Every structure is written in C-alpha cells, then in structure tokens.
Image (tube, helix red, strand yellow):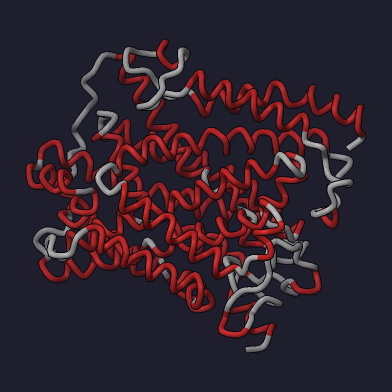
C-alpha cells in the first residue's frame, strides 16, 4: 500500500500512519516528531468531522455506562442529582482533553513529548509513567466489563475470566496486526454501539426509576454529589494526556478552535450519553429485584438484564456492547506504548508490537485478579488518576498562557535537553498539588483531614485542592526559574 493511501486510511487515531507502514503492518515510527512533509497536505471537512466521531465512538462504551451506575448505587444519589453530576463532570473533563489535543497538529509531537515543554525533560517522565498507569488501567477495566457481559450472554456457562481473555485477545490482535482496519472500523464504530444502546434505552428505560432521591442528611448528600461529580470529571479528563497523540499527522495550519471544539464535543457527548444510561440502570436496581440480582453478579450482567425480553436479539446486542469496548481499549493501549517510549531509550529501541503484547498481558492479568472488585477499582483508580491529570493540565495551561504567550515554542527541540525547561518549577508545583490532593482525597484507603470536614463520610476534594494549589504556586516559581536559567 502506498504511503499516501496508508496515511489517509489511518486517519487521526492512526497507529499505522504515513511513513510508518511496515511489512506485515507493524508500526515502526515511535515518538519522533512528525515533520510537516509527512503530514496531510490539507484538512477536509471529513477530517475535522473525524475528530468528533473518533472520540464519540471511543467513549459510548460499557465502561462508561458502569461509571454512571455508581451515582445511585455507591453514592446513594437521586436520579436527577446523578444525571446532572455525570453530564457536567463529563463536559468539564472533555474541555481539558480538547485543550491538550490542539498541540498535536501545531507541534507534530505526541502528548507526553509536548509535556517536556511544560514539565521539563526529566520531570515529564513522571507524567509519562502515570499516563501508562491510566491507559493500562482502562484496558483492565475494558477487558473486565467485556468479560462480564460475554459471561452474562452465555448465561454463566462462559466464565468472566474466559470472557475477559477473549476481549483481551481480540484487542491484542487489532493492536499488533490490524490497526489500519481498526481505524476504518473506528470511523463507523458508533453506529452499532448507538443501535445497541438505543435499543437498551427502549427496553430498559421504562424501568429507570427517575423518582428516587437522596435520603441522607444534607451535608452527606452534598459531599456525595461532589465526589461523584469529581469521579465523572476524572473519567473524562483522563484522556487529556493522550489528546494530542492522534492528531500529529494533521498539518500545522489546522484550526485550533475546530480541533478543540470537535474533540470536546466528541468526548463530552459520548461520555454523557453512556453515563446517563448507567445512571438509569443504577436507579432501576432500587425498585427492580431482577436488576438488583443481576448487579450482584456483575455490572455486565446488569447491562444484559436491560435487554430482558428481547431473547436472542438482546444477547446479540450484548455481544455488540462487549466487543464495542475494543474502541475504547485500543487507543488507550496505543497511548500507553508511546509512554513506554518516552520513559527512556530502552523503550524506544524495543519494537512497538512487543511492548503492546506485554501491555495487554499485564492489564489482562490485573483484570482477572480484580474481577470481583470492579466498582472499588472504578472509585479509587479513576479518582486517583484524575488528581495528577488535573494538576498537570493546570501547569500546562499557565505555562502556555503566561510564559509562552510571547516566547512561543520551538517544537524542533523536542529531544534536546539543553533547549528544554529544567522543570524545577513545574516539579515543585506538581508535588505541592499532590500534597493538596492527599489532604483532600476521600478514598477507601485514605481520607484526608480536609475531606473529613465536609461530612461524616467525607467528600473527595482531591482534584480541586490539587489543581488549585498547583495553580497558585507555579507562576512565581516559574518566574524565578526563568530568571535563574533563562529557559
């Protein structure tokens, strides 16, 4: 296949992009900056639309349906409260993803390479490592929920472990050998998912209990609202460290406002739609005994129970829902592999397909081990990852808006440590932000002293304290760093 055709087929999520389409379809390009000569010559309306379509397809998946379930089930929120918190959190987080995505076309660098301009060469490796944890963690969750749904489709005759392995194997095959075909699929992936989810709404919607309300004391309700809102925000903004990865083949003159707007719409709309279905299913467990019994089995079983009455057609749609998680899994695995390459020369020298295999094996093993604790994993993992992403995004925004407003960026210096910031200010602000996050976090394993002040159960303030503390201390520290080192 000629390079030009490969570049156009791959589109913006491409793992098989122009200049890196090798024998047997294995990608050879790593984190190197994509020169303008290898990018699209122009951006068409279809290319812009692809930005929103890809992010929408990536996020209308069962894992985000499961996030929505947490509102009524774990946080004891009413239907309206949970719905508003999930939508507002998804949209706010999508804004962060949209902002970070704009650096892809203008720089030609991957997101964690761009982080070197904000955090410095060495401190940015911390972000790369944390991003690996996020993306592999999502892979674990995707495989586990897919396994749960497949097990429910087979009436328990197929174990969750086997179902998990099936989803992982399919993901691995696509990552290593079929990325060109995957991105053609990704363009259209929203269609079968939308059909399956709209049928789910029609089948299960009448049993959504929209009348439920939170019944605890006022302070506890307020704390739970904030915690669930923060969780949905974390789920959305977690894509920010990968936002620019998929646009590096767009030309430099790609409109920033269009990139920002379409990415934000794709992420926000996809997450909101899936979360709201999850809120509805979670609310139904309060009044529907069969749904509560299905939830006792797994969240995947609850999703399939929503198709009750449709018989074989419902099970077919359940398979669509399970396999639809591949659309969420592959971009995350792709970004994690890039993170390994950012960490050091050994990652850069290791063939991409080997890193991909190890990554899939790692999160499959974790999924199997944690198959009985999905909701606990969701609550603790997503919130914890949201803390650092919010802190990093604030630092990036201030560096960009305050200190780079006139100086600009030399994107050709992406691998030259002598031309990149030392990162002393960013690292200090990052650590201060984490202190705030620890003091404000409210998780099973730790409740910070500030979080305890909200109510007897606490409220998760980690993402807010972490981001605000970093926001306050970074500008003066960065000013001192520039005065001392000049970069």
Q: Nearer the viewer, residue 414 or 274?
A: 414
Position of 450 with respect to 324 (left or right) is right
Left-right relation of 464 to 416:
left
What residue do we see at 29% from left, 46% from top? Answer: 278
The spot of residue 326 in percent (x, y) is 40, 64
212 versus 50 height, above or below: above
Q: Residue furthest top?
A: 453
Looking at the image, is 339 positioned above or below residue 456?
below
Q: Quadrant of residue 400?
A: top right
Residue 8's place in the image compared with 235, above or below, is: below
Identify the residue at image location x=29%, y=67%: 320
The residue at the point 82 percent across, 35 percent down is: 403
Q: Residue at point 61% right, 74% down?
A: 27
Q: Is 224 above or below relative to 108?
A: above
Question: Image quadrant of residue 221?
Answer: top left
In the picture, the quarter occupied by the N terminus is: bottom right
Q: Position of residue 229 (x, y in %)?
A: 41, 32
Number of numbered labels in the structure image: 0
Residue furthest bottom in the image: 1
Q: Is residue 361 left or right of residue 101?
A: left
Dividing the image into 4 quarters, which one contains the C terminus? top right
Whether residue 227 is visible: yes
Q: Judge by depth and name the residue closer to the eye, 229 or 323.
A: 323
**Nearer to me, 168 or 145:** 168
- Residue 435: give x, y in percent of width and height: 58, 21
Question: Looking at the image, can residue 102 be seen?
Answer: no
Residue 295 placement (x, y as % from top left): 17, 45
């Amino acid at each position: 296949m000629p390079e030009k055709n490969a570049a156009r087929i791959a589109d913006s999520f491409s793992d098989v992009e122009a200049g890196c389409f090798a024998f047997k379809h294995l990608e050879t390009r790593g984190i190197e900056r994509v020169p303008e000569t290898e990018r699209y010559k122009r951006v068409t309306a279809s290319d812009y639309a692809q930005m929103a379509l890809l992010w929408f397809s990536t996020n209308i998946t069962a894992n985000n349906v499961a996030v929505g379930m947490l509102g009524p089930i774990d946080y004891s929120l009413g239907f309206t409260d949970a719905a508003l918190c999930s939508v507002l959190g998804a949209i706010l987080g999508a804004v962060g993803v949209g902002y970070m995505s704009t650096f892809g076309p203008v720089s030609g660098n991957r997101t964690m390479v761009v982080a070197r301009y904000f955090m410095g060469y060495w401190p940015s490796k911390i972000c790369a490592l944390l991003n690996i944890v996020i993306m592999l963690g999502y892979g674990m969750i995707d495989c586990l929920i897919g396994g749960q749904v497949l097990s429910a489709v087979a009436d328990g005759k197929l174990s969750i472990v086997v179902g998990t392995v099936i989803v992982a194997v399919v993901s691995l095959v696509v990552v290593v050998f079929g990325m060109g075909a995957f991105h053609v699929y990704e363009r259209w992936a929203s269609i079968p998912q939308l059909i399956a989810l709209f049928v789910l709404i029609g089948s299960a919607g009448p049993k959504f209990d929209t009348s439920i309300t939170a019944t605890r004391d006022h302070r506890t309700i307020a704390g739970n609202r904030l915690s669930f809102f923060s969780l949905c925000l974390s789920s959305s903004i977690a894509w920010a460290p990968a936002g620019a990865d998929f646009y590096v083949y767009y030309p430099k003159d790609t409109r920033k406002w269009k990139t920002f707007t379409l990415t934000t719409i794709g992420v926000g709309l996809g997450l909101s739609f899936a979360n709201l279905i999850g809120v509805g299913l979670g609310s139904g467990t309060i009044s529907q005994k069969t749904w509560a019994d299905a939830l006792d089995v797994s969240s995947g079983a609850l999703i399939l129970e929503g198709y009750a009455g449709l018989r074989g057609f419902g099970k077919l749609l359940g398979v669509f829902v399970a396999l639809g998680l591949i659309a969420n899994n592959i971009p995350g695995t792709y970004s994690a592999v890039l993170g390994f390459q950012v960490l050091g020369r050994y990652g850069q020298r290791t063939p991409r397909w080997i890193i991909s295999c190890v990554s899939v094996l790692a999160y499959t093993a974790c999924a199997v081990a944690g198959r009985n604790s999905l909701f606990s994993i969701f609550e603790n993992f997503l919130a914890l990852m949201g803390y650092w992403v919010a802190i990093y995004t604030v630092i990036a925004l201030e560096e960009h808006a305050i200190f780079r407003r006139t100086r600009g960026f030399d994107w050709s210096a992406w691998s030259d440590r002598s031309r990149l910031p030392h990162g002393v200010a960013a690292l200090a602000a990052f650590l201060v932000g984490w202190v705030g996050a620890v003091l404000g976090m409210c998780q099973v394993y730790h409740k910070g002293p500030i979080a305890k002040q909200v109510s007897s159960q606490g409220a998760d303030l980690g993402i807010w304290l972490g981001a605000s503390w970093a926001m306050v201390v970074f500008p003066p520290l960065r000013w001192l760093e520039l005065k001392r080192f000049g970069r």
